[in-house]
Image (cartoon, rainbow, N blue to C red):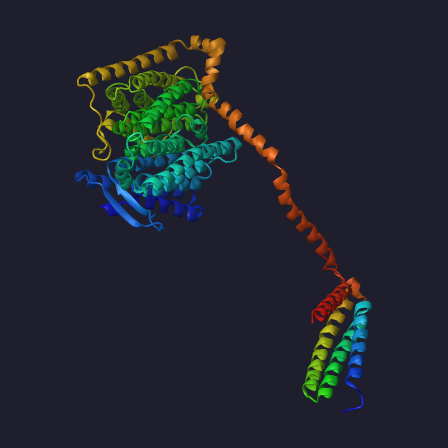
Amino acid sequence: MIATLPLTFLLPLAGTLILAFFGARLGARGSAGVGVSSVALAALATALLAHAYLAAPEAQTLTLWRWIAVGDFQPTIGLRLDGLSLTLLGVITGVGLLIHWFAAWYMHGEEGVTRFYAYMNLFVASMVLLVLGDNLLLLFLGWEGVGLCSYLLIGHYYRTAANVRAAFKAFLVTRIGDAFLAIGLFLLFRELGTLDIAELLRRAPERWAAGDPGVELAALLLLGGALGKSAQLPLHTWLADAMAGPTPVSALIHAATMVTAGVYLVARLHGVFLLAPGVLWLTGAIGALTLLAAGCAALAQTDIKRVLAYSTMSQIGYMFLALGVAGFEAAIFHLMTHAFFKALLFLAAGSVIVSCHHEQDLRRLGGLWRRLPLAYAGFLVGGAALAALPLVTAGFYSKDAILWQAFAAGHGELLLAGLLGSLLTALYTLRLIVGIFHGAAGSDGARRAESGKGLAHGLPLVSLMLLSTVLGAWIEPPLAGVLPAPQHGPAGWHLALEVLAGSVALLGIALGAWLFLYRRAWLAERVAQGRGARLWRLWHHGWGFDAAYEGLLVRPYRGLVSGLRGDAIDALGQRPARLAGWLHGALSRTQGGKLRFYAVSMVIGATLILLVMVAAA
Amino acid sequence: MNGVPMAHGLVLAAVLFALGLAGLMFRRNMVFMLLSLEVMLNAAGLAFIVAGTAWGQAEGQAMFLLVITLAAAEASVGLALLNQLYRRFKTLDIDTASGMRG
């Protein structure tokens, strides 16, 4: 059974190659067919693997070949199937399939469908390699691969300069994190002599005592990589701009899979992080800060995709919070449910955007619930899961698990942040849903909205709706044995916490409904002037991180670069170039085309050579 | 053979070669350039003959046969070029054919 494991990334890779070489002949429909079916086959292979694994849960490794052999450094192309990688594999191929399918509807009639599917398939292949790699080098290969695909797909509509800038920004900012990760890998290899993950986790406690500065540094560097990829403070600024790509890209890459790679990395290397309590605390603190900061920013966005982007940062903040309190299982569980309901929200948003003739400004939408019933249902179910509506949604159970882990680990401040965050989540979710579907339509596009039709539009939405309800929470990731067991807090308190978390969510929903349904005029007045307007502007611009980076990093760097243009060293480098140019001019002037001049030159040259020979003899 | 010292023969060859070379360098008419080339070739041939005779070796005469053959081939190619030059430019001035200047 394990032999089918490579198929999970080879099939999408084959899809990419077919689309790259024969895409022009396939046309748009054929390209979509190839793109969807390659992921469908990969999902089928995953289902077979999951079936076999759940019957006999035993971690297996499949080594395909030795990648590089340099002395002791012999990384392999090795795939590891265990509960953690299987969970991620299921999310990538399963949710990936639904999104690919939906994209066939979303991208219909757009240009560049072949390119889109080629990159999407390449993304799936890279992401599968990332989670299956049994050594950190292979993981890094996948890590860079998904970064590349993210860049390519954000810039899908490359004719608009702003989209290209957004893609460039995403690439650069995540690259900062990747540099940290690469240095972390160097450090781990130097200290432990291996990049094989299982071996690494075995050797780390032998090499380092808990809290050793060496392991703290290694964990900090790994965390840097995770922060960049997962859009956490302070490397989060790229995700909101990344919404420039097509909406299925946002659903797959910037909500369900790639941005959670950082969570996967920390969970996979939990042994290293558990040895570094300082960095583990930092992880939780950054998660808590991000979830609050991004939650506030989500309240003041006007683009529906940007609301969802900030919400994604906030939800990944929850996962980092869980990682910070060593609740690895809770983090992965939330990763899975978040993939379901956030993909649903993005696809529903995509449905609204296409139905309203590419209108995605909250102020220009409204009153659509009667016209777009399926998208409305998608937003209601996904929004309920996001806001953790008690008992019936998947999001409630996963978020509750995180809060319980924070409580059990005795981190009161993180628990408080989590509860406050769920209040914010409920508020911005309500604002989003009310803004799109209630009130009066703000534009012609919204008034002329036509609901999407067809299986490719409906089935992914309905499937994800089912997965976002309590049904999704029944999928229990088989993580026992891979990750440390969750902590058991004081008995009896769990129910109390559940009631507390549930009532906070309900309070948030009620407050949001009251504010956004019945107090709109009052709210609009508040944010129009004075302190409210200043707060709105601050949150609307994401706490001013972009402006700060622009002023502190980008502009000084640009100034430095333009100042250094034509410095002394450069001028020195210009000398040989100018000399070569001058010689070229002189020599080309001798090519006068006069035969007699050539003859005279030859005679003079021959005479000189003869003279030299005679003189030398 | 005796009487004429080798040095005299070689000086004559050098003078002929220099005359031919000067003609090649300073005449603009292509007919005269070809003539000068012939003179130079024959000067070289004369040097071979003189040296071969002085040292009593037959290779000098053999080389002269090669030189004559070469001169014949050169004359045919040269005359074909001359023909083309005249057809294209209606003149025999070699300086008009300077289209390949750098």
For residue A613, side relative to residue A119 (left or right): right
Quadrant in the picture for residue A484: top left
Provide residue A492's location: percent of width, then percent of height. 17, 17
- Residue A277 seen: yes
Above or below residue A507? Residue A375 is below
Provide residue A7's location: percent of width, then percent of height. 30, 46
- Residue A374 seen: no
- In this rendered view, identify the residue nearer to me: A559 or A14: A559
Q: Quadrant of the N terminus of chain B?
A: bottom right
Above or below residue B75? Residue A517 is above
- In this rendered view, identify the residue nearer to me: A8 or A200: A200
- In this rendered view, identify the residue nearer to me: A387 or A314: A314
Residue lying at 26% horizontally and 46% vertically, measured from the top left: A62
Residue lying at 68% horizontally and 88% vertically, measured from the top left: B58
For residue A237, side relative to residue B49 (left or right): left
Quadrant in the picture for residue B2: bottom right
For residue A572, side relative to residue A490 (left or right): right
Quadrant in the picture for residue A515: top left
Residue lying at 24% horizontally and 45% vertically, measured from the top left: A2
Provide residue A350's location: percent of width, then percent of height. 40, 28
Q: Quadrant of the C terminus of chain B?
A: bottom right
Provide residue A372's location: percent of width, then percent of height. 37, 23
